[in-house]
Image: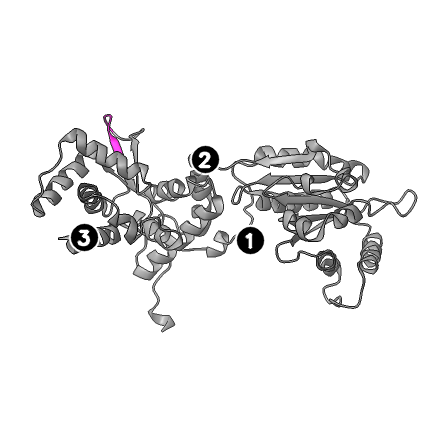
Amino acid sequence: MWDTIGKSVFKDQRTLSFDYVPPKLVHRDDQMKRLIMLFRPVLDSNFSQNAVLVGSVGTGKTATAKRFCIDLKEYGEKHQKAIDWTIVNCRQRNSESSVILQVVNHFQPNFPDRGFSITEMLRILRKDLEKRRVHLVIVLDEADVLLKKAGPDIIYKLTRFGEEKVEAREHISLVLISQRNVLDLMDAASASTFKRTNLIEFSKYNHEELRDIVTQRADLAFHEGAVGDDAVDLVAEVASEWGDARFAIEILEKAGMLADEEGVDEMSVEHVRGAKAEAYSSITESKLVDLDLHQKLTLLAIACSSKGKAFVTTREVEAAYKVACEERDEKPRAHTAFWGLMKDLDTLGIVSAKKSGPGISGKTTVIKLLDIPAKVLESKVSQVLDAEE
């Protein structure tokens, strides 16, 4: 059976994993520079430093933290500074003991998961750090989950890690990642080591930024020529509703898998629509039923004229709309009323209708399907119309 599988559009699908960290993060230079400035004392003076990364899902917080730690460790090695790092997912490990255990496991992978108190594990961790003379950056991803469940004591213990000995070397720095400002979840003692200026915000990505991210990942993951500009544009537009790079990468990978299932050598806009439909489809049967007759006919026209295309113009859709009306013995609406139907579908989030930009001659409106492949939509709308006759 394996012999029957054709050539894949992917050259390295691993680069579309959420765990993969690109050599350079697109549109996160400002956040990287902030981290570098904050952590200079770690390199220059062996001082600990702490930071909080805040932003919505898919805004690059975790990837930025990983990239920064990888680069920091490499820079330290070049300048004879021993720096290491580890990351803990606090949604999976949401107790003090489980977090400390994972950090201890970084140096002792076979360390028993029972039988040691938190104080004992911290003592063992200190010995490991002193023995290696290394500074450890601990990244607590989704730290708000940990703080809500276990409280802020663990933050206090880690940030005061080196205070038990006079003139002790500072061995631990913290990076907290959260969708909200976790300083609000700490008591005064725990929050005192986090300056408000150490908070770094991550805004949602806009369409242009997502396009650059998708382009980068497509170049890394796919064979040359396997992903067209139209497909990249549509992935970015679909994800721009949420500003979520993770969603964009998910759609990109799924669209490539759909192309492989068809045995074709290029991922098209239809594959993107199919991926979006599988991941999240806002076009349900009930939503179609709620449209009036001419809204359905307009949507049918958009579906018919969109097959194989990234977008269609108002003129193309209106021509297809008149054909659809004729086939169902309906008098088509006048141009102004038709334009109103288009705007209704745009407002409902079923299609995207926007003024044309560079590369399209003349001033017109371009219409794009975001949530579902054109052929699937055509079938769905036709079924609803047939059932109503």
Q: Is residue 112 visible?
A: yes
362 falls in the magenta region? yes
Magenta range is 361-366
Residue 172 lies, in percent from the top left, at: 77, 47
Quote the CA–CA distance across marks 2 and 3: 35 Å
Residue picked out by circle 2: 206
Check the picture and name the quadrant holding the N terminus.
bottom left
Of residues 158 and 135, the one nearer the viewer is 158
Q: Residues within 10 Å of mark 1 (few under 14, many from 20)?
A: few
Residue with the mark numbered 3: 382
Q: Which residue is mark 1?
A: 19
Camera-nearest residue between 275 and 21: 275
Q: Residue at x 11, y 43 (%)?
A: 325
Vertical position of residue 117 compared to residue 40: above or below = below
Q: Earlier in the sequence, mark 2 or mark 3?
A: 2
Contact, CB < 8 Å: mark 2 with mark 3? no
Secondary structure of residue under mark 2: loop
Q: Report the side of 150 relative to 297 (left or right).
A: right
